[in-house]
Amino acid sequence: METASPTLSRKAQIDQTATALFRRRGYAATSMRELAAALGIEAGSIYSHIRSKEEILHRICFRLADEFMAGWRNATADASAPVATQLRRAIESHVRVLIHHVDASAVFMHEWRHLSEPAHGEFLQLRHGYEVGFRELIARGVAAGELHTPDPAFAALTLLASLAWLPSWYRPDGKLGAEQIAERLADQLLGGLAN
């Protein structure tokens, strides 16, 4: 594993290295000793920068949640835009967050379960609100005759589940760039809802 960049603050180096370890090994299987070794520091000295491993997980999960929500707000800010346009923007924004933070996205998607209360409950509320946003947008599209689905809730979950696999297969050095992937996924997903 590469050592964290020396231009980052120590806390940012810890977050970056922990994110890569959590993605590769899983949160539960990653020890603070391993994290310290990957950073090239003594295990005990890591606690002068962070309180706990969960503090890192909390930062990763909530930072990404903030980015997803900011993208959602931006995508749906123009309420006069056709619903299909807003949905396209929301899908593309979601894809950009996943691609620009591949390791953190994988951790966000799978390791949030290790958050303790109250963070666990807060995270679930944020996730639920995000899903509801997609569901309501799709329902508005159906009502406006722009989209077609017998079940907007199922369509929203299918859409988000389809995108959740992106961190598993995306490669920065792959054939398609981030914008091309965002566009193609939006085309594919919206094509299934086209009226």
Image (spheres, rainbow, N blue to C red):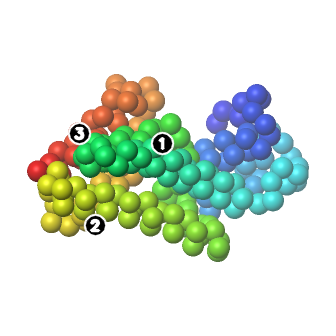
**Element under label 2?**
helix
Q: Quadrant of residue 175?
A: top left
Q: What residue does disc 2 label?
A: 153
Q: What residue does disc 3 label?
A: 187
Q: Is residue 136 above or below residue 2?
A: below
Mark 2 or mark 3: whose residue is earlier in sequence: 2
Q: Is residue 163 above or below residue 120?
A: above
Q: Quadrant of residue 155?
A: bottom left
Q: Classify the position of the N terminus by image quarter.
A: top right
Q: Which residue type does callout 2 highlight?
A: Ala
Q: Residue at x 58, y 56 (%)?
A: 61
Q: Residue at x 71, y 33 (%)?
A: 3
Which of 135/184 is in front?
135
**Element under label 3?**
helix
Classed neighbour count for the residue bearing mark 3: other residues with Cα under 10 Å, few (<14), some (14–19), many (≥20): some
Q: What residue does disc 1 label?
A: 97
The answer for how far apart the CA atoms under marks 1 and 2 are is 22 Å
Residue 168 x %, y %: 42, 45
Question: Marks 3 and 2: in contact by CB < 8 Å?
Answer: no
Residue 153 x %, y %: 28, 66
Residue 107 x %, y %: 54, 53
Q: Which residue type does callout 3 highlight?
A: Asp
Classed neighbour count for the residue bearing mark 1: other residues with Cα under 10 Å, few (<14), some (14–19), many (≥20): some
Left/right placement of residue 66 relative to residue 162 reads right
Classed neighbour count for the residue bearing mark 2: other residues with Cα under 10 Å, few (<14), some (14–19), many (≥20): some
